[in-house]
Amino acid sequence: MATQTGAMETSFQPKKGEASVDDWLPITSSRSAKWYYSAFHNVTAMVGAGVLGLPYALAHLGWGPGIAILIVSWVVTLYTLWQMVEMHEVVPGKRFDRYHELGQHAFGEKLGLWIVVPQQLVVEVGTNIIYMVTGGKSLKMFHDSVCPSCKNIKQTYFIMIFGSVHFVLSQLPNFNSISGVSLAAAVMSLSYSTIAWAASINKGKGSDVEYGYKSSSAGGTVMGFFNALGTVAFAYAGHNVVLEIQATIPSTPEKPSKKPMWRGVVVAYIIVAICYFPVAIIGFWVFGNNVGDDILTTLEKPRWLIATANMMVVIHVIGGYQVYAMPVFDMMETVLVKKLEFRPGLPLRLISRSIYVALTMFLGMTFPFFSGLMGFFGGFAFAPTTYFLPCIMWLAIKKPKKYSLSWIANWICIVLGVLLMVLSPIGGLRQIIVDSKTYKFYS
């Protein structure tokens, strides 16, 4: 597995005039990003499929707990994101360009890899699978909205259409090269979130709307609550790529990268709040516990507006897929070149990335359980990497004084994150099992 860039022996020896391996790898090949690149990369990474499931999560959490959990998650994840931005250059003269490199500094060379890499891969690969499902589902909804009398086409085919775009886009070499795609995705996320809550207000609250818990049984209510926690955790997932995004920003002792990066993060989090809270609160207020796991599927009219919003979702998750795939490409190419001694170049990139896209597309077609997947992955891997792993690293590296404000705040975040990690996958797995009973493969 990949180890720290600075501390790793390089098997590949570049020829004279040929760029070094680190100048070729996706994360470290370009360091010319501006602060606003950070803003829209973070918006694209965070405001994704998760926002559309928030009204559904509120239906399982209830008004009080639901809004409280949304606010607490926003505050906690902003705090842990600040910690990661601060720790990017915690060692003078060195940059931790990848999440696992910071993990290795905090926990040791081998242990750091085993703690961080599996979780980060689950998050990034899991998100890419869910984005395949979301992209295909939204394409189908766009088609059905535009042409309701047309012949029904399987969702599987729409996932294949969505996936085919990524065979091309995945060949873009690094983060800066996908900045245009990411900007378009960030604009789309703000746009379709606005359409979701504005169309809900336009529809108005129905006379038969109920706000009691969605499930009628006590067991179903508890499991639904757990799954909803994972849905909220899934909505705050930008931490898994934050160091990789910061790695693209230039840094000097006089102008460290953390200043422009933090500026971008703050702008991104303001946009996140503008997207999340109105969609969650207004969506639940209008539909109550009848809201679906995707607010846009619940909204059927006006038809042209819902079709537009679904196409915006498609454009957004195209960018979101690339933002989450880039660190995976970096890990794959680091192992292939530095460990297995493959020669860096277009053939290696073309084959390895195409195999990855094909794999996530196949898994998305096979297991398209939107709400269950969000709950399961949200708790299983997003909670550690987003809610409490940065806090553990902060305690290990910064060593704040016992019972100081920093020490107490970090331990509160750790306890909340561990609870989320333990409870959410239970609800998510149950939801997947329930959905799978009525599901026909490749329908």
Image (cartoon, grey):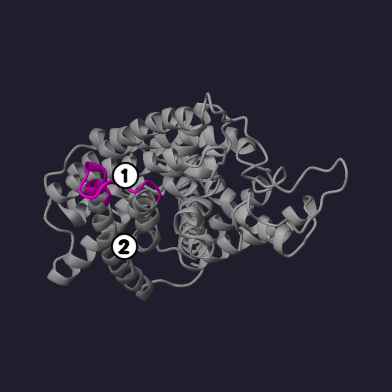
Q: Residue furthest bottom?
A: 437
Q: Is residue 223 something that shows in the picture? A: yes
Q: Position of residue 153 (x, y in %)?
A: 52, 58
Identified by mark 2, the residue type is Met
Locate residue 36 relative to residue 25 in the image: left or right: left
Name the secondary structure under disc 1: loop
Q: Position of residue 135 (x, y in %)?
A: 50, 50
Foreground mark, 1 or 2? 2
Locate residue 145 relative to residue 9 in the image: left or right: left
Q: Which residue is mark 1?
A: 299
Q: Is residue 58 above or below residue 340?
A: above
What is the C-alpha distance between the residues marked 1 and 2?
Answer: 31 Å
Q: Is residue 300 above or below residue 424?
A: above
Residue 214 falls in which quadrant of the image?
Answer: bottom left
Q: Which of 12 and 333 lies nearest the eye of the viewer? A: 12
Q: Which of 281 and 30 lies nearest the eye of the viewer? A: 30
Q: Give the crowd class for mark 2: few <14, some 14-19, many >=20 residues within 10 Å.
A: many
Tell me the quarter of the image containing the N terminus.
bottom right
Upstream in sequence: badge 1 or badge 2: 1
Residue 403: say if magenta.
yes
Locate residue 386 relative to residue 34 in the image: left or right: left
Q: Position of residue 170 (x, y in %)?
A: 65, 48
Q: Which residue is mark 2?
A: 421
What segment is highlighted magenta in the picture? 397-410
Q: Residue furthest top?
A: 254
Q: Which of 61 and 146 lies nearest the eye of the viewer? A: 61
Name the secondary structure under disc 2: helix
Q: Residue at x 31, y 32 (%)?
A: 274
